[in-house]
Image: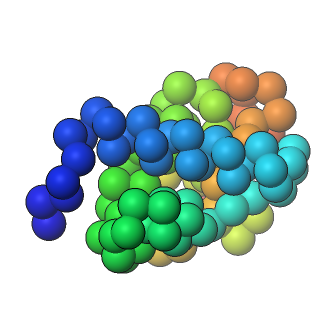
Amino acid sequence: MNLPFHDDLLAERIRECLMELLHERGPGRSICPSEAAHLLGTRLGWRWQDLMRPVRTVAVALVERGLIEATQHESVVDIRDVRGPVRLRLRTLPGVRSASLAEV
């Protein structure tokens, strides 16, 4: 899908939305990426489903910057490799994982 926003502007809107939701939720609490897609879709007048891939892409960048972490079944996971639903949460100390990666 070709969204009517420049990629950088859309990415910035997604980053702001993710961080807004995470800060509202508070330390130790998580959000589903779809929550950000729903909120941003409402704000922009777009279908939230069309925003899921860009939201996940921006989430990967935030994980790589050490600002958030992705979890699945209460374990920290590598968002670049994991399949299926994930949750996002603020890291307690930026750049330091709150919990170790799940053992495989």
Q: Is residue 61 visible?
A: yes
Which quadrant holds residue 20? top right
- Quadrant in the rendering for residue 69: top right
Residue sticking out furthest to the right: 27
Query: Measuring 53% from the left and 26% from the top, which residue is drawn there?
Result: 65
Q: Position of residue 85 (x, y in %)?
A: 53, 73
* Residue 55 in the image, given as x and y percentages of width and height: 42, 55
Could you tell whether 93 is left or right of 17 in the image? right
Q: Position of residue 45 (x, y in %)?
A: 38, 69
Given residues 98 and 37, the one toward you in this image is: 37
* Residue drawn at 12 percent across, 60 percent down: 2
Q: Where, quadrant-wise, is the N terminus in this rendering?
A: bottom left
Q: Which quadrant is the C terminus positioned in?
A: bottom right
Here the colouring is rainbow
Up/down of 11 relative to 31, above or below: above
In the figure, 69 relative to 54: above or below? above
Q: Residue at x 40, y 61 (%)?
A: 44
Q: Is residue 92 left or right of residue 63?
A: right
Question: Vertically, is 5 above or below 33?
Answer: above
Residue 83 in view: no
Which of the pair 71/56 is nearer the observer? 56
Residue at (43%, 67%) from the top-left corner? 41
Residue 17 x, y percent position in the rendering: 57, 48
> Position of 32 compared to 94: left or right?
left
